[in-house]
Image: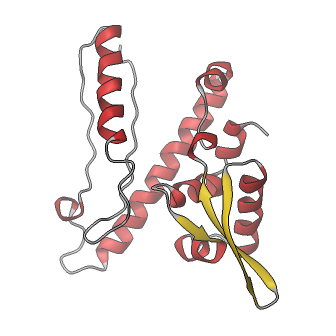
Amino acid sequence: MATADLLLHPVRLRVVQALLGDRTLTTGELHTELPDVPAATLYRHVAVLADAGVLEVVAERRVRGSTERTYRLVVAAASVGPAEAAAMSPDEHRRAFGTFVAALLADFDRWLGRAAEEPGGPDPARDGVGYRMTGLWLDDDEFAGLLDDVRAVLRARLDNAPGPGRRRRLVGTVFLPAD
């Protein structure tokens, strides 16, 4: 199965997102983070991702006669490469983008649900939540420079480990040419 096919399933995409940030989780911990996904469904999708090399087993331990595995995301295997993206049809791109947007919306809804239970309710400034579109006039070289800058900013922080005061934050990017 191609990487795009693997990642276009909403449950598998959510599993991948749950492991972003160099996290390691057991299937039980994944189920705690994705409680709306039936356990059997989650186990099946984790197995598909592991068989495809998108997830790797980093630990195993015996629990009540079965083996509990701890998984980590193989980041290089969890993205669609340029060659595969170039070979996708317009409908496949539409489906991929729709899956991405649906996952983003679901993450936003989960934040709203958690934040609604906090004193004062949802507070984007407190939680560092933001969304906006900006129009930039750039030629191809300037746009390539912007991409290099964004990659450098993110790369400088990718190795941050969990620690006191740190929250895992999801960063999504979309670049579209406008008419």
Given residues 130 and 140, the one toward you in this image is 140
Does residue 119 sit above or below 142 in this rendering?
A: below
Image quadrant in which you'd find residue 146:
top left
x 24%, y 24%: residue: 135
Given residues 138 and 79, the one toward you in this image is 79
Given residues 145 and 155, the one toward you in this image is 155
Residue 77, percent across and down? Answer: 64, 42
x 60%, y 52%: residue: 13
Residue 5, percent across and down? Answer: 72, 40
* Residue reaching furthest to the bottom: 64
Image quadrant in which you'd find residue 62:
bottom right
Task: Tell me: 59 left or right of 125.
Answer: right
Given residues 97 and 71, the one toward you in this image is 71
Does residue 36 sit above or below 131 in this rendering?
A: below
Image quadrant in which you'd find residue 132:
top left
Quadrant holding the N terminus? top right
x 26%, y 79%: residue: 118
Task: Tell me: 73 left or right of 87.
Answer: left
Residue 159, percent across and down? Answer: 39, 51
Task: Tell me: 138 left or right of 69.
Answer: left
Quadrant holding the C terminus? top left
Q: How many marks?
A: 0
Task: Tell me: 30 left or right of 113.
Answer: right
Model colouring? secondary structure
Residue 81, percent across and down? Answer: 60, 29
x 68%, y 20%: residue: 87
